[in-house]
């Protein structure tokens, strides 16, 4: 197939949208498809996975580039003549691409990745929530198909009156994230540094931003026999440091590749704190590494954590329950091992290859749907 991938975020910015787009492009290249990438101007490479990357004018908003209206978008799409347009987390740029596709008769698949409802609640937007959902509905109703990552997101979009929905999750690198990493010499050295007295390591991986609510780790203050490890960076770092001041915590900063895999493997318990995740990729990476997960009963983790089997789901507003579940795992090594093994089994069928094969099938379905006459 010929695919135009339009993403609101791309390299050098690293986040969930960028990572999933990279995996999709890697899969398309490995399986003989052709692609072109359109992204907001932010210093992206000119090519990725052998495919050309085109930047369009953008405006920076809260450190994120936002693609501005530009006729170049339609010209690029028309010149490439794709079979389908892939709009990753569409907003201004994605909306342009979907509209251009409709004018040119090209089907589009939109990937929903932003928890609008959760963001609105946290920021007390009130009436603006309805406006935000109208914008989301306008964008996604233009697409032939919208793919949502979780049952929670599906319910939100259905309630907002958005149609033509299907589930599409995310893959996980089952080789990079693996229980055997715990036996690696570098991981052992890291554990010795992080837990010099053999403490249980409770870890977090992700961006440090308000919606991630990492400050909630303060609920573990005074819990004996633990050390906290935080992997990531972002605007909330000063706030997190203030809330966790005086606690046994190590900040490893943003990591990637083998260093990130080693960090996961050093953990005994993975704690996910935010309630606005549309999916929860770090939960899958922890499970792939064989680590039990404690996460809120909200958003994407509801589909990923089997409560009492591969981790625990705490009530979203109950920090006491968060602490109780972490404490149960800290005190019981056999429970951690059993839940960690169950977590690994949970993700064995979720390789990126398998998940991206599903995506290509969705592309094909959108093409067929666009080509099928509507009965009057």
Image: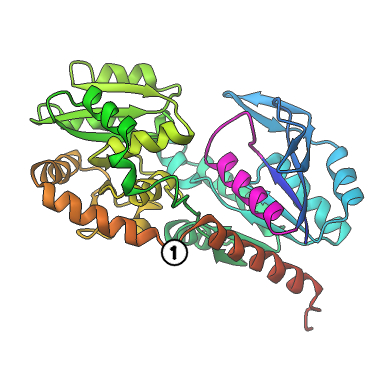
Q: Residue at x 50, y 54 (%)?
A: 170
Q: Residue at x 35, y 33 (%)?
A: 263
* Residue 194 location, quadrant: top left
Res. 123 in view: no
> Which image quarter holds the N terminus?
bottom right
* Residue 213 location, quadrant: top left
Q: Farthest residue in the front direction?
A: 185
Tell which of 133 and 364 is nearer to you: 364
* Left or right relative to 159: residue 42: right
* Left or right relative to 111: residue 55: right
> Which image quarter holds the C terminus?
bottom right
Tell which of 106 and 347 is nearer to you: 347
Res. 243 in view: yes
Q: Give the prevailing secondary structure in the magenta stretch.
A: helix
* Residue 49 location, quadrant: top right
Question: Label 1 belongs to which residue?
Answer: 349
* Left or right relative to 248: residue 180: right
Q: Is residue 148 above or below residue 52?
A: below
Q: Position of residue 37 (x, y in %)?
A: 75, 43
Secondary structure at numbered mark 1: loop
Q: Residue at x 26, y 32 (%)?
A: 188
Tell which of 135 and 288 is nearer to you: 288
Q: Residue at x 48, y 35 (%)?
A: 257
Tell which of 153 and 300 is nearer to you: 300
> How does the figure colour the protein chain or chains?
rainbow
Q: Is residue 201 above or below residue 357?
A: above
Q: Residues within 10 Å of mark 1 (few under 14, many from 20)?
A: some
Q: Is residue 133 above or below residue 52?
A: below
Q: Which residues are magenta?
A: 8-32
Q: Is residue 89 magenta?
A: no
Q: Position of residue 308 (x, y in %)?
A: 19, 59
Q: Is residue 14 magenta?
A: yes
């Amino acid at each position: 197939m010929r695919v135009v991938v339009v993403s609101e975020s791309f390299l050098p910015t690293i986040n969930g949208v960028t990572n999933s787009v990279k995996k999709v492009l890697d899969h398309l290249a490995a399986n003989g498809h052709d692609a072109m990438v359109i992204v907001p101007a932010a210093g992206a490479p000119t090519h990725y996975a052998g495919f050309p990357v085109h930047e369009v004018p953008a405006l920076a908003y809260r450190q994120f580039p936002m693609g501005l209206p530009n006729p170049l978008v339609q010209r690029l799409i028309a010149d490439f003549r794709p079979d389908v347009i892939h709009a990753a987390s569409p907003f201004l740029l994605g909306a342009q691409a979907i509209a251009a596709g409709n004018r040119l008769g090209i089907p589009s698949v939109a990937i929903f990745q932003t928890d609008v409802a959760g963001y609105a609640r946290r920021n007390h937007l009130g009436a603006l929530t309805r406006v935000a959902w109208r914008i989301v509905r306008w964008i996604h109703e233009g697409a032939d198909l919208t793919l949502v990552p979780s049952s929670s997101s599906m319910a939100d979009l259905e309630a907002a009156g958005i149609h033509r929905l299907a589930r599409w999750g995310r893959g996980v690198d089952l080789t990079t994230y693996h229980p055997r990493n715990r036996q690696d010499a570098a991981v052992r050295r890291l554990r010795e540094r992080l837990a010099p007295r053999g403490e249980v390591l409770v870890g977090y991986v992700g961006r440090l931003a308000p919606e991630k609510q990492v400050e909630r780790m303060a609920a573990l203050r005074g819990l004996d026999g633990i050390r906290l490890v935080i992997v990531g960076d972002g605007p909330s770092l000063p706030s997190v440091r203030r809330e966790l001041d005086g606690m046994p915590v190590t900040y490893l900063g943003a990591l990637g590749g083998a260093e990130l895999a080693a960090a996961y493997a050093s953990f005994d318990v993975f704690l996910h704190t935010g309630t606005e995740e549309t999916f929860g990729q770090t939960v899958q990476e922890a499970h792939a590494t064989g680590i039990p997960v404690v996460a809120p009963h909200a958003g994407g983790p509801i589909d990923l954590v089997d409560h009492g089997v591969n981790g625990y789901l705490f009530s979203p507003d109950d920090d006491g329950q968060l602490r109780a579940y972490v404490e149960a795992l800290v005190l019981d090594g056999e429970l951690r091992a059993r839940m960690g093994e169950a977590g690994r089994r949970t993700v064995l069928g979720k390789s990126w290859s398998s998940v991206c094969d599903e995506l290509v099938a969705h592309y094909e379905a959108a093409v067929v749907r666009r080509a099928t006459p509507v009965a009057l």
